[in-house]
Each structure stands twice: as structure tokens, then as C-alpha cells.
Amino acid sequence: MRENWYLVLGLAFFPEAVEDEALIESKIEEKRRFWTRNEGDIHRGADYRRYGQMVDEIKADMLGESNIRAELIKDACLRIYALIDPKLKMIRKVEISEDIIAKIAAKVEKEAKCEVGLDIVRSRVLALGMKVVASGAGDSRALYDKYYKLKPPHADKFNAMSSLLRSFHVGNLYDFLYAGRNIRKPRHLPCEQLRARAREKKNREYYKHDSISSSGSKLCVLSEDCFRDEASKRCYDSYLDYNTVRDILDGLSSSFDIAGELSHEAYMDFVEGLTEVLKNRREAEELLSAFCKVEKIPLAPFSSLTGAGARSIKVCRCGCTNDVSDGRKLCRACGLDLEILCPLCSRMNDASTRVCRCGFQFENIDRALSLLELAESALQGLDYELAESLVAEAEGYWPSSPKASEVRLELRELKQRMGRTVLDLRMACGGKNYFEASKLLERVKSLAPGFEDAELEEEIALSLAEAEKYKRAALVASGEEAVIEACSRAYEFCRDLPGIRDLLAKYPPLAPAHLMIDVDAKARLNTLSWTRSPSSGLIYYAVVRKEGAIPLSPEDGSIIGRVSTLSIVDRDISPGQAYFYAVFAERASVYSRALASVEPILNLFEISGLRLTAGDSLIQLEWGVLPHRAKVEIERRDPPGLWTRLRPSSPSSYVDRGLINDREYQYRVFLTYELGSQRLSTEGIFLSARPIRLPLPPARLLVRPLDEADFILEWEGSEEGEVRFYYSEDRPVYSMGTCLGLSELEAHLDSLIVTRTGLNQASFKLEGEEAIYILAASVKYESAVIGPTVRATKRANLKLGHVGLVSGNIFIALEEPKEATGFVVLYRHDAPPLDISDEKSVKVHIPLGLYRHDGGLVIEKAQPLGYYFLIFAEFSQDGDIDYSAGCPYFFSNIAKREILYSLRLARRLFGRATVELVFEGEEGPWLLPDIDIYMAQGRAPMFKETAKLFCSITAREVKGSIAMSLALDGSLARDTYLKPFLRNEELSASYLLRMKTGSDNKIS
Amino acid sequence: MALKPSFICPFCFEESKIEEVQFRCTNRRCRDVPDIELTRYEHGDVLIPKMAKPTFRKLSKWGPKLGAAVCPECDSSTHAFICPACHNKLPLSTLEGRDMIISVVGSRDTGKSHFVGVIINELIERIAVKLGGAMEGFDDTMRRYRAGTYQRLYFDRQKLDLTRSSLIDVNNGAYRPLIFTLKLKRKSLFRSYIDSYTLVFFDTAGEDLNDEDTMSTVNKYICKSAGIIFLLDPMQIPAVRNQLGAHVVSRASSVDWRQATRSDDIMTRVSKMIRSDRGMASEAKIDTPVAVVFSKFDVIAPLIPKGSTILELSPHCSEGAFDARDGHNVNSEIRSLLVEWGAESFMAQVDMNYSRYSYFAVSSLGLENNPHEDRSIDRPRPHRIEDPLLWILKEKGVIKEKR
């Protein structure tokens, strides 16, 4: 077997060989093209040529019933083994690592010039009795590269942050976000918490327009990006670990440079430092050993992980190494248990375990601990809600966590002890009641001695101080305006400062005037407006509503708004309910007299969502949900002008039947309300409609381009109703024959502006480049019946190339338009085809595949006639077909009139020699066109330019043949040739001047 | 049909007597034996001969007779005739019908491969049908043709590469000619017959015609040819080249005209080889019909004045015979053009060496189908490609002439 087609074709043969014949055939075809293209390749051209010639052989071996694929697969394996074995032999190892396998595979791939997977090398290693081990075991260089040399992804991006972080004296984003907070391991917090913290920090601390805020804000944005998900957070964490590891290893290197040796103590320090990062003592030692090996730092065998020493060392989750030989159970650094009970399976695990056997990830414990730290911090700030949510989240990560229980207990105790005090304190601060807040703060401090909130204390103190200042000013002020001004200021700082309200009460504001109430039944709201209170100072207006009686004070009724503007809208009203309104001017919680409505305000909601749909002899009325206590009433105005009361039975619609088509009917639809003994009606809504027999939709719609942007629309059918056109860039969802309201149709589709060019024909211009779907609809009154949909797209005009006769067929070469799916060629012999729908034309459809096969459009068996062509490119997509603009072309295949000529020199004994020239045509009379006879020496004249005119013959009518005798003027030179030419070269399209067999152009 | 006394093998072009025809066993179970002749023909190493089924002669006391023969090794009968010289399987038409070895010669890059590639397809698809017959490939000819030239020209739509010399690339399979059987109906007074002709096309690399030694080893078939089609690249005529744009010339010709061997040199060598093969005196004219053909006519068509016959479509196929009047006019026009363009020396060579010749102009790819910059072409739509072949067939009496 000389060639193995699996290898040549690059088909997989191990562990699963490709056996799908369709796949193999397509691969052979793909390769054949590749070989054909690359026959000239300087290295492998000869191979490719050979393979190209062996395609049939390949097919015979790989396809069909007589294939030899099984043998080829076996052979391919053997060939690859023959390349693998010497390499494995050369290595002389019993344990082969994965990276060696990868290297062998790469080398074999290069030698075999085909794809070689790792599996085949691995299987061969096992078959030869060797062992496959994970790469990196004992591979110092790989470890060195992994932890020290190779930067983690996006390291450059993170490096760019360092200058910003330095300006805040922090080393990483975690420290930045939780600077000043009592949380030890913020990097264990979940991403949502970190992002929320970044947002909070940005809004609260870095909202100003200074350089610090700018840098802080940038870091907050970067934090949000870095912690957008767990993957990006892991990426940032690996960058931090990389930096830490690198710093430790650089420290080791520098220590060795200075001291010239590495002591056991120093070694242990570095190991512990690395363990803290890697959370694995053995890995840390291996890395250190690998680093020393690569950096050529002599290292004595210091490992502590042998024998009993190894068993007495336990690494905490925080990375701290603990010697448990003294029976220690808790970490010496963080106090966490050195053995943790898995919350899922209750198995006891070392604290350094990453994943429990049951699958629980101990990383979740870190997260829970960090969240609980945050919860404790929130408890200190008496933020119960936050603390509670953080504990709940922590319990989600670490169910039945003892630490969470502790925090929850603490939270409960604190809540019981504090009662509503904290809540009241918050409310007082929120309402600017700082006098009360100061008292509550004192109480909080006495109940929770550890509570400290410097910001809050400062806020209360400052507000009170300012308010006191203005109060003092008010007390010494003379005149109403000065007192009001000072009191208003004091009120703005602190609303409950004793004495201020008493001072203001002496000067209540004047009431506003001219209360106007506008009742809008259709919009179902009341609008109130009034004029300004003449009092000075900051005046607010409290608007109060009361059912059944006039509100006497701001507390008498429900306040619908406290505004500084002079109007308000009341939407929260019930239909048919009598309301009274009052407006009070308010200045520092001192109210004026009431400006009230004397009459009750009654809003009788009008009917909504009313819609009329006309049908054949009927009109359907539909409306929305009726208001409470309302009933619908319908009246129809009949032709003499009388109103007929109709009785609707359904709560949402009524069908008025037995109407006369095409007559307009007017309806009044209104609501009646039963208010006690009273019955009130709304004005109602007047609508009219005309019952109609719906027109038939257009039966056929055709769009054809006139030019690149101009199109013609043609349609058939729809004798009744007006045909209108709508368009959209997406295919309309309406199916043909659907009837719907015109307004609904126009709400979804745009109207197409067309110019009528005939009874069933219109033109339009397409402005955009996108394809549009045009929908035709028959419209009568306000109803539309959906017709067909067509697609129109701007298409480039066809560009014709060579058109001529090839092998008795007319061949039309043209550039293939983009996205074309075929061509339509129309031709006539008598006149140019009018358009694509010209039924007198012969229509030939040429699919794209045939066009590509022939390299052009072929009209078979050309007749000797003139062909008026009109050629269209066809574009079919999802069943919609559109065409390019027609490309006209005239091709003359009319047989030429053949004129035979013969020349002969007639010598005479006496007199001059003459040239006997005979023209022969068809038997009947025919027209001999103007002929010029040229002469040349040594050859028959071919070009008029290089020959000499001998004589000319004028056009004449001939019957059958004509002989002419041309007298020679003097003697002719030797080798003189004569040849007749048509004087008018354009006539060569109609005449063919040919020499008769046996005659010769040579006359001398 | 009666057997001929001798035949020319369409593979090795050796002439053998009919009684020397051998048979090859076709029984798959018969043992394989070393085939030195076949190995030699395929340029193999005779020390590692190609293995094939045994060959043997059929001995008959009643003289040469074909039909079935019995393998002396396995006693199974066979109908596979093989050439005694090269051990290639022979078509029956070689032994019974007339041989029509058509030599297509010309210097490098004159369009020989394109001519052969296109005319075979035209013969199969159109010309043979119009002449009232059919053409079929022998043995693996059709497969080789379809997989090679046809695939490249008609499917990949790529211009063909220059043919590699058989001396340089002995393994390219080019030493195997394309063999077809042309079957034409002939009517007599009472019944109609079918005449078979073996058409053999041998696409030679132009550089194999550059010296006599190579020609005598590689191109033996020329001496046995029924007709020679001699292709001339008009771009190698300075007067033509100067009238065309440089980019037109470069797209049509991939070989620098300065490096191409002159056509009259090749004509001289071909003539000398035929004469020496036939033992003719140097003054004697060779009677093999020679069609002197302007190839790549599509490139020079714009230079030809309107009304010229060569611009018209070929009338022969539609006539069902060779139109002598058209041939006469085309011949006259091409001669005039050659004189106009200063190629008299070549004409003189033709006139001095051959008694039967005529001039033609063809375009294998068709008018306005000059290869694009990326060597891609439209599907070939040849112009007058059948004229030279039909003229040779007319000269050999295979088809009729219409005067």
C-alpha cells in the first residue's frame, strides 16, 4: 500500500475513524480543489499533482462497497506508530508526561504531514507499558514559567491601575473598596457585594469634581468592571497572586544575592509566604524548589513535608501554616478551625481543602466568613437590615455556619435592647427633626455603648447650631418680615427647634385665592388651580380632599399634595363620588385659612376604548371596562334624524345588525350612573360607521424595476374598493384575505406613495438600500382587506458582456449580480418585449446553477432571425421573488446575403488586357451594393489602408449574376492581387462577399 | 469488417503486422507475471517490472484471426487484444478501422493543450453529432480527459498550465495519448454502414519539439500522423504584437516571445523527421495534410477588418460536410494576413515541405474570453475550432466536401 488516504486527506482515524461516506466524499472534493490550486507549490507541488491524478483511485479505495477503509485505518495507525516508537525509545523514561506527549505529537505531525492527535501518542505510550503522568511533575521549568514567568491574562490592564491605587495608598482594589472598614479578607466577598460597594463609594465619596474624586471614581468604575462576574474576579485574583508570588520569589533571589546562601529559616519563611498565597504547602515547596533550580540557587533538602513532620503541619484557609503537634485546633492567625465540617456531607476536612469529596466548594466558606465580617460591621453601625441580609447571604454560602448563628443571635439581642430607638432616630434625621434626633442619639449611646457614628453626630450638631443661630436672630429682629425670614431659615435647618413655631404662629400666611376645578370625564381626573398667596417667604400649598364636606384644616381630609406650584391634578378619584377640595398656604408648618370649593365636585367618568367595526349589513361596537356603578347606553340616529335606543346585553360589546350597506349610521354611546335616587348620564361619545360588503383583495401583485430605484407595480382583481399599498422592511404578518380596520393597518405599516400610471398600474421610487415588502390592500371606507405581498429591492442593472453565436446557440455573457438566484430571458423576433409579464415573448428561465455551468446564458437552437432580448436577474428569498431591471439587447442572427465573386485576367491579342469580374447572387433580382476593388502586390489585399484602390463599382440591381470587364490601364506589376470590398463597412452585417471556389485574387 | 494487414499502435505508434497482435488474459485469478514491455512503456524500472496478467499470441493455421483466445496458463478465454510492442490494450477500431492520428504541434505556449482539450469536448458534444455519428473514448481515455483538461477548463474555469516535458516529468501520464473512436454513418444504395476511425490526440509539450533528438524519442507519433495541425501563436509575430496592448499580450501568452522557438524551426524539424522516417528525399514534398492554424484568434479578432470570412461562424457542421468555399476564403485571408504581418518565411517553409496544406484561424476559448488576471476564464466557447480537423478528415476522405 503506497499511500494512505486517511493520512493524505487528513481524516481522523484514531480513536474514532471517519467512516461517513458523504463526509469523505466532500473531503476528497475539497482536497482535489486544494491540490489543483497548489500544483505549483515549490515544496509539495509534485505530490499535489500526483494526488490530483489519483482522485478516482482514492474514491475507489475510500468509498463504495469495495472500499478498503478498514485496512487503511490499520495502516495509518501502524505508520504513525512507526514514527512515535523511536522517539519514545530515545527518551528512555518509564513515566511520560503530558507535555512530552504533546511534543511528540507535534513532531510526528510534521513528519507525517497529517494531523496527529494526542490520543494516539498516549495510547501508544500505554501500549508499550509506559506510564502517562501529568505534566509538571518534576518539570521545574514548567512550574517556573507557570508561576513566575508567564503573566496572567489582562496583567497589563491591571498594571495600569497601580498608579491610581498608589494615590490612595492601597495595593489592590479590595483594599481600596474596604479601606477603613474592619474586614480582613474582602477578596472573598461575592462579586455583587463588591460591585455594590464600588457603586456606593462612587456615589457617596467620589461625586465631586476634583482630582481625588476623579481618580476614586475611575477606580470604582474599574472595580465594577473587574468584579462584573466570577470569571473576571478570578482573573484579577490570579493577577494579585502572581504579583505576590513574584515578590516572594524576587525576595528569595535578592536574599541569596546578598547572603550567598539560603538558610533553613529563610527557606521556611519563603515557603510559608508562598503557602499563604497558594494555600498548599507541597505546591509552595515544589515551586520554591523549581525556582531555585531554574535560577541556579543551591538548595539543601529542607522539606518539612516528610514523615511525621508532614502530618503535624496544617494550613488554614487564610494560608497560615500551623504546627498541630501540640494539639492545636484553631488557626494561630485567624482563629478558624483547622478542620472544618462539610456542611453538605458532614465529613471532617482539613481547612486547606478546596473541594470536599461530596463536591462542596470550601471557597464558599471564605465568602461566608467575609460576609459575616461585614454583617458584624453593620451591627456596629446599628444597621439591622443590612446585617440581617448579609447573614442570610452568608448562610446561603455556608449553611448552618456556627459563626452565622453567633451573628444572628447578637443581632436579635441588639434589636430587643434598642427597640424602635434606632428607627426613630433615622426618621427624625430624615425629617430634619434634629432636636429630637439629638435626644434619641443620647439614648442609643446609652443602650449601645460601642455605637459610634461621627458623621451622624456632626450632622445633628451642625444643624442644631445653625438653627439656634437664626432663632437668636429672630428673637432680636424687629418687624414681621425680618422675623419670618430668620424663622424660615432656622426652620430649614431644624424643623423641631423649640420656639420657632411659636414665633411663626404670630404671623400665619395669607390664603391663596380663585380656586378653579376642572372636571375631565374622558381623562378621568380633576385639575385644581389657584392664585398665589400674597404672603412673603417660602410658601407651600397643601391641597386637601374630603368626601361629602369641606375640609376645615390640613388634617381634615386626605392631603393630595404639598406643592409650591399653583395647580395640581387629582387622579385618585372615584366616578360619581362628590368631593370637596381645600387649599392651604403653608409657611414653616404654619397654615393659612382654607381656600375651599363650595360645591361638591362630581366626575362622571366617560366610556373609554370605544371602537366601531363595520361589516356586511352590521356594525359592531366595542368598549373598555366600565367604571364602577356605570351602565352603558347606546343610541343610533336613523336617517330621518330620530334616535333609537339600543339595548346592549354584553358588558363589553354590541352588534347592530340588519343595517343597510353603504349608509352612514351615527351612534351615541354614554354611561349612566345610579347615585342614590339620582340617575346621571355622561355626555357620551358620538361615532359613525358605514356597513359595507368588503371588497375582494387584489388577486395578483407584481413589482418590476424600471431602473435601479424606480419600480412599477401591477395588480389584478379588486374591482370594488380602492387599492392602496403599504410597506415595511419586515415581512408583514397579515395573511391574504384578512379584514381589519384601516387605522390598525396604518398603525403597523407605512403607506407607499405611488403614482398611478394606468388602471391597474402605478410607479414608485425606492429611496433606501434595504429591501421592502409591499402589501396591497383593498380599502373601502375604513376597512381594508389584505391582498398579496411582494418584495422590492434596489438591484444594480445587469451588465452584459459578449453576446454571440456559440455552437449554434446564442450565448450571452453577463456579470453575475450579487444574491441572484437565476435569470429570466424574454425574447421576441418582431419587437422588443414590453416587460417581464409580456405574454407574447418567449420566456426562458435559467437557474443560477445552469448559468454557472455554461458560463453565461445560453438560448439554444438559434433561428436565423433577429432577437429582441429583455434579460432579468431573479432574486428569490424565502419564497419571495423579485427581479432586476430588464436589460434590453438586440441580437441579429439574420442570415447574410452571400455574394460570390470571381476574378480572371483576360488577355487579348489586340488591345488592352481586361479583368473579368463576375458577381453572383441568388437567382432572382438582388441589389449589388457599392463595391471598391483594391489591389496589392504579393498578397491579396486584406486591409484597405495598406492597399491601393483599383476601381469602384456603384450599387445596382442585378438579376442572378453580373459580369464586368475592367480595362487595365497600362501594364500590371508582377504578383498583383485584386480583392473587392464593400465600400460601406456597416453593410458587412448584411452582406458576405466571398470568393468563388477555383478563383484566385491573383491576376498577373 | 475485414482486418488490415498491419496497424499502428495508438500508444507506442509502432507499426505491427496483424498476426503479431497478442492477447492478455483477463481472468482475475490467473497469476500475475512481470511485463517488461508495459514497464518500459510506462517509463518504469525494468528491474522492478510491472506485474500484469500473462500475454500470449493466438496461433491459427488459418492465418490472422481475432475474436477470442484461450490463456495457456488458466484456459480461460479473453478478448483483450494488446500491442506486441508496448502491451497496451488496443481498440478494435485500430485493427479493423482506419487510424487517424492527429498531431498537434507548435512551439511553446501556442495553445496546443487548450486546442486538444476543447476540440475533444466539441467533437463529442457537437461535431460528431452534426456529422451524423458519435465519438467515444477508449479504455480510460474518457476518465483521464474528464479528470484532467476537462475538469480544469469546464469546471474549475482555469487556464491550463504549460504542459511539462515528457522528459522532465515521466510520471505525469502525458505519454499516454487520448484515444477515441469516431463512428460515422455511411449510406450506400441499399443499406447504411458505420465506419470507425481511431482518433488519437497526443498533446505534446512545446519544448519537446525544440530539438530533433527529443522529437525522435518522444514524438514518434508525428511520423505516423494522418494529419498535422500546426499551431501558430500570432503573438509571436512582431507586427501583431505591436498592434496589441502589452497587457493583452501578457494575458494571452505566458511565455516571452523572445524565448519561444520560432515556428519555422519547428516546421523544419518536423518535416525532416517525417522524411527520415519515411525515407524520403529532402526535396520531396510530404503528402500528409497540414492545417496551419492561427491559434488565439480571439486576441487578434479586433485587428481583422469587418466582413472577413474568418470572423463568421464555421459553416461546416451545419452543412454536414466540409464547405470548400469557406475553406478557400479562410485560407486566402490567413495567407494575406501572414504576408501583411511579414511571416513569408514560414509560408515558404510550408510550401516547400508539404503538398497538401491549408491555413486556418481558431480560438479555443472563444471570442472575448481572454484569461483574466487570475488566469480564470469563462466556459470555453470556441470559434472555428473544428475547421482544421474537418479539413484533415476531408483530405483523408472521412467526410465529404461541399463545393
Image (cartoon, helix red, strand yellow):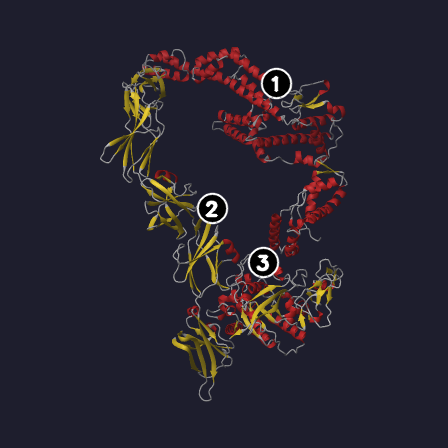
Q: Residues within 10 Å of mark 2 (few under 14, many from 20)?
A: few
Task: Report which residue position mark 2 lands on.
Answer: A878
Residue at the outermost front position: B190
Using a 10 Å C-alpha cutoff, classify the residue at mark 3 as few (fewer than 14 neighbours), some (14 to 19) or many (20 or more): some
Going by the numbered disc 3, the residue's amino acid type is Arg
Q: Residue furthest left?
A: A640
* Secondary element type, mark 1: helix
Q: Position of residue A62 (x, y in %)?
A: 65, 51
Could you tell me which secondary element the residue under label 2 belongs to? loop
Q: Are marks 1 and 3 in contact (CB under 8 Å)?
A: no
Provide residue B111's location: percent of width, then percent of height: 58, 64
Q: Is residue B129 left or right of residue B95?
A: left
Q: Nearer the viewer, mark 1 or mark 2?
A: 2
| Residue sitting nearer the eye, A508 or A940 | A940
Give the CA distance from mark 3 to mark 2: 34 Å
Q: Quadrant of the N terminus of chain B?
A: bottom right
